[in-house]
Image (spheres, helix red, strand yellow):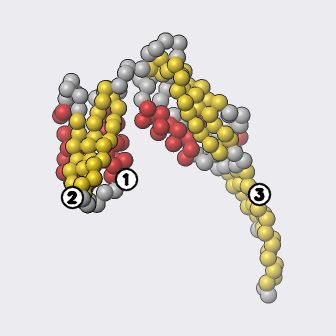
Amino acid sequence: IVNKIDLTLPPNVNKQFYAELFRFFKKYENEYYDLRKVKKIFDKLETISTNNSLVFLETKLNETLKDDKIDLSFELIESKKLYIERINILGNSITNETVLRSALEIDEGDPFNQLLLAKSVNNLKAKNIFGSVRSNTVLGSNPELREINIEIEEKATGEISAGAGFGSSGGTVSFSIAENNWLGTGKKVETSLS
């Protein structure tokens, strides 16, 4: 059971930006702990921060267990002001660059945000056309800039199936072909014949 939820903000951040979230906390207190609701809180924190141009804030969560109840303490911390100098996508030979870049929540020149980078990697994984997706961050041309390397491993996306059956009313033959990354555009194409 969630006992209480609180949010700690840096002194220079207006508490009114997060008023809606404090109301959500009250609804969630004294209910069963639910990881989806915790993720929803993270998403709301990120949305509110982005909408109010508070891009250099990172969210930290502390969970404290007391008997059969849990306290959730979210803390917004001002991070170092870093910007993305370049995003390198490595290991791509089939998929169009635009398909990959459209899945990213970040772009070159944006403030560096670890949460948005993690969302971008998850978006690429969700396309289900890559065997693995990994990212790492390296120092850019100066201390305030970062380069992001996203390494992808493309997997076979085509499927062929054939079947035959025979029964008292006759026989059937079927054949189908499917491609989950048609011409590198990330589109699914399927055809079948019976």
Name the residue that disc number 1 marks: 36
Q: Quadrant of the N terminus?
A: bottom left
Tell me: 33 left or right of 13.
Answer: right
Out of 130 and 171, give the one closest to the viewer: 130
Q: Nearer the viewer, mark 3 or mark 1?
A: 1
Separation of marks 2 and 3 at Cα, in angstroms: 52 Å
23 or 169: nearer the viewer: 23
Q: Residue at x 77, y 57 (%)?
A: 160
The C terminus lies in which quarter of the figure?
A: bottom right
The image quarter containing residue 17 is top left
Q: Position of residue 87 (x, y in %)?
A: 56, 25
Query: Which x, y percent locates residue 173?
Result: 81, 71
The residue singled out by tag 3 in the image is 160
Amino acid type at circle 3 is Ile
Q: Amino acid at mark 1?
A: Arg
Disc 2 marks which residue? 30
Mark found first going from the N terminus, 3 or 1: 1
Circles 1 and 2, Cβ within 8 Å, touching? The answer is no
Residue 177 placement (x, y as % from top left)? 75, 56
Q: Residue furthest bottom?
A: 168
Looking at the rendered structure, the secondary structure element under dot 3 is strand
Gap between marks 1 and 2, in whole Å?
A: 16 Å
